[in-house]
Amino acid sequence: MIKKAFSIFYKDWQSELRTRYAVNSLAMFILVTVSVFVFALGEEKVSPQLIAGLFWIGAFFSAMSGLSRIFVTEEERGTTLFLKLVASPSTVYLGKLLFNLILSIGINLFITLLFFFFFDSFIIQQVLLFFAMFLLGSAGIAISSTTIAAIISRASSKGNLFAVLAFPILLPLILILLEITKVCIKGNGLSDGMVELGMLVSYDVIMFTIGLMLFDFIWKD
């Protein structure tokens, strides 16, 4: 199963390298978003709460614009039936999730680098906590987005429906990430962010379990 899941990931990755649709559109979206933040704030002193909010707003809307097409592309190319014949639902889910995970990490890494470059107040003082939050947060966004993308892949208004479904599901995750990011920027002790980090782990595990259980019904419908 793992080998087939990796094959599905590799197929999507090779397709993305040929077209660069998601990479190019996401890069431009992130650049425009961060540029708007920079020009809007100007020389204003930015608080840890505000910089953390801006960071995850950028990450959230970038995920909305890029991670939703993972199953839509299969519908557009007419390859959905082929995937159903050659791989089990759990294998397809894991392969698609791996692709979205790599894309989510890339999105958040690019946003992080831009924030380091443009905002003097974006200084991470708790590096280990930020690194753990970064990986778990990226995983949470990828897991939720993959499941939602599968649900809306056959809908007529895919983009609007994805945002409607994603907001209530991703909002708790974004709020947890905001709290941990504030701790990392303020330089508080690690203990101040451990409760939120535990909640982050729980969110990822719960969403992954739900997604894996529901995908069999979603994929065969």
Image (tube, rainbow, N blue to C red):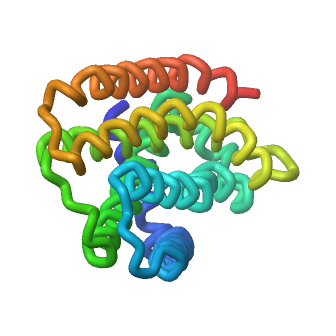
Q: Nearer the viewer, residue 191 or 16?
A: 191
89 shown above or below 19: above
Q: Which residue shows up at 32% across the image and 26% down it?
A: 196
Q: Quadrant of residue 170?
A: top right
Q: Quadrant of residue 106?
A: bottom left
Q: Nearer the viewer, residue 173 or 63?
A: 173
What x and y, as percent, mark residue 13? 42, 62
Left or right relative to 116: residue 142: right
Q: Is residue 191 visible?
A: yes
Q: Quadrant of residue 86?
A: top right
Q: Which residue shows up at 24% across the image and 30% down it?
A: 193
18 shown above or below 98: below
What x and y, as percent, mark residue 58? 50, 60
Q: Residue furthest right?
A: 156
Left or right relative to 120: residue 146: right
Q: Is residue 99 visible?
A: no
Left or right relative to 25: residue 6: left
Q: Nearer the viewer, residue 4 or 197?
A: 197
121 shown above or below 5: below
What x and y, as percent, mark residue 208? 45, 25
Which quadrant would the C terminus be assigned to in this image?
top right
Q: Which residue shows up at 31% across the image and 44% down it?
A: 182
Q: Which residue shows up at 19% across the image and 55% down it?
A: 124
Q: Nearer the viewer, residue 89 or 34?
A: 34
What x and y, as percent, mark residue 220? 70, 27
Which quadrant would the N terminus be assigned to in this image?
top left
